Amino acid sequence: MFRNFSRLNKSILNPSNIRKLATAAPPGPQVSVLANGLTVASQSVPYALTATVGVWIDSGSRSEDSKNNGVAHFLEHLAFKGTQTRSQRDLELEIENIGSHLNAYTSRENTVYYAKTLQPNINHSLEILSDILTKSSLATNAIDRERDVIIRESEEVGKMYDEVIFDHLHAVAYKNNSLGRTILGPIENICSLQRNDLVEYIKENYKGDRMVLVGTGSVNHDELCEFANKSFGHLLKSKIPNVFGQPKTIKTHSFPDFNSDEIKIKESSLPETYMALAVEGTSWNSPDYFTALVCQALAGNWNRSVPVNNGSPGIQIAIGTGHHGEPLANSYMSFSTSYIDTGLWGMYITTDGIENYKLIQAILNHWKELKKGMFYKHQFETAKSQLKASLLVSVDGTTALAEDIGRQMVNTGKILSPEEVFDSVNKITEDNVVDWFNKKLGAGKLAIAALGNQVDTMPSHKEICNEMVRYN
Amino acid sequence: MLLGRRVAPQVLSRAGRTQLRSFVSQKEPYETVTLSNGARIITNPLPSHFSCLGVYINAGSRYEPEALVGTSHLIDRLAFKTTAFSSDMDIKSALESLGGNYMCASSRESLMYQGSVFNEGVEEMFKHFADTITSPLLLDEEIEEQVNIAYYEISEINKKPEVILPEIFHSTAFSNKTLGSPLLCPVENLPNINHNLLYNYRSLFFKPENTVFSFIGVDTDNALKLVEKYYSNNLENKGNFESSNMGLQVNKDYAHYTGGETSLPSIPNPASPQKFSYLHIGFEGLSIDDPDIYAAAILQTLLGGGGSFSAGGPGKGMYSRLYTQVLNQYGYIDNCVAFNHSYIDSGLFGISASCLENAEPYLVEIVCRELAHTFEDGKQGLKPKEFQRAKNQLKSSLLMNLESKMVELEDIGRQVQILGKKTPLFDIIGKIEAVSLQDVKNVAKRILTGNAQNKGNGTGRPTIVLQGNREAFDDVEGTCKRYGLGRFTPSESTKEPKKKWFF
């Protein structure tokens, strides 16, 4: 029997045996497309008594212009404020009474509404979702009341410095492009957006072919399709057909050229300095998508609670003990963010130190070593393992599964099975990684955003860019 | 899909009285095995994209004899250090290369080692789990390092009321014994932690008959092979249970609930301009095997509550009593939430709340009033609608939590540890559905009037924990009495009740 166990191991590693494994594991997701272009994607889970059902929309703040920036997020708030047939109170009580949960969020490229529910209430929850999505009342008094809530949310986001830094980073890297604007929009817009702006945004973007109805857990694909037809079948198709995972032809989606520049905001009252350095990364559908993620894992993360010793990676020793044995920074974190046609790859750093010249040098030196392939085999393998774990082991429960399926479908137009993800990561070689580092870190283009009391001790943008290409 | 049968769901949910039980299969995938050395194994063999493994040991703070108080905390922190087979660094790097999802935690009634890993890494991860459980060297420098971290950890936790107050609540409710024994090692005991003490702890608790292995995504044959190859073999080869024996005994006393009051001074928080006071009021609750346990869980859901800033969207209890009657009514109350802890032979049930400074007496009055309403018959008594809602929410939160394999892993492992078997979901859902509104009122009266009547023969006095200006809270126990909360000995209850001055 134990031999059985090791055979199973091998089958995962050997791509030719994947089919065998797939038959042992639960069947993969089912995908159908309705006449109006709406996609239904579902994955049933054996023994599940609960489900997550939701609508993933291929539209977010990127589908706005400077005048209506913030409208996608505003609309998401209004969704729970009543429909043509349900008051806000009715809506809330109905959900509470059946023990379902309702959630929504807006990102730069997606808007998502979903419900978590017990199996007997799946259709009821779907019906409420379709009601808030297609029959939201958008009452003007509700709109006016919500302005204050969103402004308060905006103030809260303003206190989260990582959020602030990433907003600035987008603004620098994607200057004059809708991808460079924030999700919440400027306060002026939050104060001035009108009912008509919301209606126009819906008309423009809530099209059948920009939506994926996702169901996971105790769901039946045919029933989901039937429901989708009945409740969303009336939505129109885009004038120029939308293809998930491909650049859009709508006017707000011009190609975001990566802009090599910086923004440094001196804020003496802050005890820390926050900074992000990014090169152009990979898009969702890039063949290098997983390579960029392995590179991110290899570039690594660290914070002061992690002890640094002789066995630690060079950058941890450099940053962890660089200032007379004291750390140069409080933390650093590598990131790899993807969009339809571009991405950002880099590092986010927080420090309360004053030696930011040395700190940036340590990071550039680390990147340079990665370009030269100066890392151990076991570090490379650990990076791949951690990536696989974060991609697969985190999909624990119907909501995480719906999130995974919805995100993949709407952003790439396809759904990779866990076996395919595993295989894609396993296939990446050290050479692939070194090539990617050289291509991206050697291009000499870098976006920088920094905020805090010590931004002036950082090297200049020009110095950093020169340093990055020096040993090319 | 192994569901019982499909019924037209829309019709059912419209009626609002869905019998979820008809959707639950009576057949479950779990298998349990007991090894010849006494160790038990439970598996869910259904394959998935990753597997989970857990080890549960009958240990934890309530079982510590006097000489070992606080030792569970250090045993937990010393997991995954140097063993007879591998160095500290090698274990860490091996577990990191398996994705790094592993942990050890000690609680009042269990010591848990848990991890999740892609299927090909199960054997490697289990090997390290078995090694750290059977063969740790417990090097002096490792002990010293963890003791030093513990000092820091304890000082940090003392600054967080939301973490420390529930702990103090337990120590007050059980007078520092059994379930009131500290989860964190008391600072005065830290200097005594040494190799010999830890060794004695291990020889007392780390026995195969005290150990349950739980697996998800691994079939029983493979689970058996793994446990025998790594755990049982290590035990036989290492002969781990002999040395300078201090002759200690496991503390097997029943948890004796005493109730009482503890108050702490407030901790200044320079980051916040507003100062808050904290109140926890509770009573002896029910043990895990009590037949009323589901009624008590419905009562907790019905009271619900949370933070004043946001209920977290529709479905998270925004129409529960502590929202509609408390948080939505009084702006000075920042937090108000019902709690319900169940242990092997006792439990704790009550409300924790916080308010702006100077509102303390109002808070006490409001919390006591809400508790008392739950077993009254009048206008303020429990209503069928809210009861039905709480019942549905309890079922859904139970099943939604169990979606997670990590939650399922712990659930099945702990059930085998405590009850000796896994109770089928079919039975649990059936029991929840069978609870009536009168059952909930009865359990509210039973608990809140101090009549839990568990094996430990507890008193009926309330447990009260306060943080802030003690004077400002006034006579909390007196307010409890006035609302008929708690059970007092005759001499205590003859006191003249205070005049109502607030409502």
Image (cartoon, coloured by chain):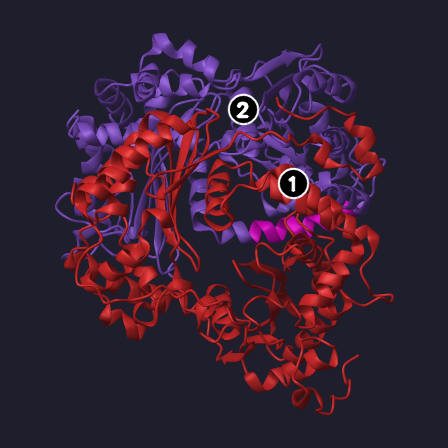
Residue A70 in view = no
Observer-nearest of B174 and A382? B174
- The red chain is B
What is the secondary structure assignment of the residue under circle 1?
helix
Residue A179 in view = yes
- Front: mark 1 or 2: 1
- The purple chain is A
Q: Locate residue B420, reporting x and y percent.
A: 49, 46
Q: Quadrant of the N terminus of chain B?
A: top right
Q: Is residue B255 left or right of residue B194?
A: right
Q: Are marks 1 and 2 on the same chain?
A: no
Give the residue furthest to the top. A16
Q: Locate residue B137, reporting x and y percent.
A: 17, 51
Image quadrant in which you'd find residue B403:
top right
B464 relative to A456, above or below: below
Give the residue furthest to the front. B36
Q: Which residues are magenta?
A: A141-155
Q: Which mark is residue A59?
A: none
Q: Residues within 10 Å of mark 1 (few under 14, many from 20)?
A: few
Residue A338 part of the magenta-drawn span: no
Residue at mark 2: A405
Q: Locate residue B90, reporting x and y percent.
A: 18, 40
Q: Locate residue A274, reporting x and y percent.
A: 36, 49
Q: Quadrant of the C terminus of chain B?
A: bottom right
A420 relative to A309, above or below: above
